[in-house]
Amino acid sequence: MGEFALIDRWFRRPAAAQAAPGVALGIGDDCALLAPTPGMQLAVSTDLLLEGRHFLSTVDPRRLGHKALAVNLSDLAACGARPLGFTLGLALPAVDEDWLAGFSAGLLELASAHGCALVGGDTTRGPLAIAITVFGEVPPGQALLRSGARAGDDLWVSGTLGDARLALEVFRGSLSLPAPVFEAARQRLEQPTPRVALGLALRGIATAALDLSDGLLGDLGHVLRASGVGARVDADAAVGLLAARRAAPPDVLPELARQRALVLAGGDDYELAFTAPAARRAEVEAAGRATGTPVTRIGQVVDTPGLQLVDGQGHALPLQAYASFDHFA
Amino acid sequence: MGEFALIDRWFRRPAAAQAAPGVALGIGDDCALLAPTPGMQLAVSTDLLLEGRHFLSTVDPRRLGHKALAVNLSDLAACGARPLGFTLGLALPAVDEDWLAGFSAGLLELASAHGCALVGGDTTRGPLAIAITVFGEVPPGQALLRSGARAGDDLWVSGTLGDARLALEVFRGSLSLPAPVFEAARQRLEQPTPRVALGLALRGIATAALDLSDGLLGDLGHVLRASGVGARVDADAAVGLLAARRAAPPDVLPELARQRALVLAGGDDYELAFTAPAARRAEVEAAGRATGTPVTRIGQVVDTPGLQLVDGQGHALPLQAYASFDHFA
């Protein structure tokens, strides 16, 4: 099968389905043509995912298609941008029809749910790699950035944290879990939910935001440096975000210190961390309710640069145990 | 070295240099923010380049940096779009400082020459892969598409054809050439010139255009199918586009049939093929002169679908010898 037939068969949808708002010309020419709403800014983000590093070779292709786009939509969510379209670069070791059918279905279902059209791509033979670049719209001055956190702001996190890493540790053999607990965690690892609606609802409320991909504390460091502030994080409030704690009897989970590590430095969460003035707490909670997204306060922004980790009684905890994952470490 | 330090050191330029027109926020947040001129369309193209398939492992990293962006700018050129910015996904087997210094220099020099800012990226460890997505602006309705060719139009090609493949055949050991002839051809393979200025100058003159990456005849087929027309290509006019014919004594080059194959199906040319009404011949030539780009007429668009290949006397030549390269063939 040729490259062009491959794109046609699995990734091109009927013209009517492609004619998304904001897309003047989709797949099939040298370039796609986007028609952004005049005056809007275009938010752009890109991710390169490789087998063995960003996903396991055994992952279901439908889930992989979902995740590959979800991690990019999560970046748009973190900026408060409305998804418009994306491009896909795909290197495949061989043309495997079952794999392509599953991958494209997972990818295009999530794309359709977010009104985010596949506008162009490039396919080639090689070690499995997925390169996605996503585009969204945001009114000038309204994008959520990393640089706006101010001392006194609350520190919030969406959804749940640590369960993706919990599943990864089971795959790695360092933990074992009852099947239903593992399946729920695996779902978080393999099919993260990009918080696009929450990101949009937080425009004008949140002072700073970013998406959590490499672990809460490490990622939070980017906001603190960009904003010139510090933060105090309540490890006990944070550990409550591990969904497995609600689903599983305590004796099947690892000890508390390891649960904290999963939540604080596990990575692969694709939740939003964001800051907002304490006076706007009710508005943050309303944004969470309106978008069906749990939001939890886990700390405060402070003047003193750097991170302080405390337990529920305010006692300092050591940070060293929670170094962030780094792709070149 | 961490991922973030890597981006900072080799790919981030001082803030002043990043503040390109149309870029509201560059590298360093979850998304970059582009500020397209209100009312303009955004042309988008993406390419995924892998070592061993799209470039040789021995290529000079500076030339590779140039080529990785050049092939994407060539897609913008083919649409008549003005470059605005690009994202870079980069998988590297290891952090090799010499390689990164060369690659980023070649990449950013070409970017700077075209006013095309690096606005975001993603780096990871893995088999060498380069994923670039490029953005450009074009006024609505003025993009050069593949679908506008009409019977009676002239068929034009920019620059020279076949020399990139000639160099590749020397690398593969199927040919040998005197050193200066090889070096000139190698330059075409490793540092193609994106015809951005010509693409802009052809707006409103050319009826259809595309960039030549996989070989003239195969790529031309995309224009013919999209436009519902055919074409007659003069193989003798085309073979004159092999620059090595002007630089080398005839006895060091392969025989005529093989020269034709290099020009008609060699690939990796990154020139523009375009069509324009015969009445606008002088304007096409003026666009070539104004942008310092050779332009050559090599045939005509005809009503009868399909490609006809003829020699200088109008005698039919067989097409089968010139099947296009396909990444999944």
Image: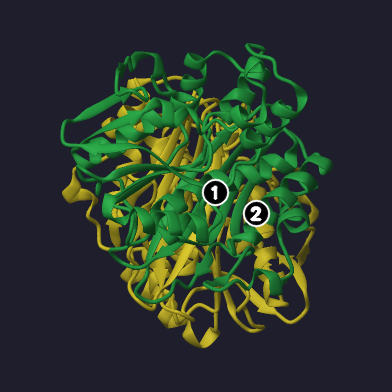
Chain colours: A green, B yellow
Say whether mark 1 and mark 2 are on the same chain. yes
Label 1: which secondary element: loop
B113, above or below A131, in the image: below
Q: Distance from label 2 to label 1 (Cα)?
A: 10 Å
Q: Provide residue B198's location: percent of width, then percent of height.
A: 40, 67
B12, above or below A244, in the image: below
Q: In this view, does A227 lie to the left or right of A126?
A: left
Whether the residues at callouts 2 and 1 have beta carbons within 8 Å, the answer is yes
Q: Mark 1 points at which residue?
A: A194
Q: Out of B316 and B95, give the one closest to the viewer.
A: B95
Mark seen at residue B138: none
Q: Numbered disc 2: what chain? A: A
Q: Name the residue under label 2.
A: A110
Q: Out of A38 and A15, give the one closest to the viewer.
A: A38
Identity of the residue furthest to the right in this view: A98
Label 2: which secondary element: helix
Q: Provide residue B181's location: percent of width, then percent of height.
A: 45, 37
Q: What residue type is labelled 1?
A: Pro
Badge 2 or badge 1: first in the primary sequence: 2
Residue depicted at 71% across the width and 54% down the height: A7
Q: What residue type is labelled 2?
A: Leu
Residue depicted at 62% across the width and 78% down the height: B149
Q: Provide residue B11's location: percent of width, then percent of height.
A: 31, 37
Residue depicted at 39% across the width and 71% down the height: B200
Q: In this view, does A233 lie to the left or right of B144?
A: left
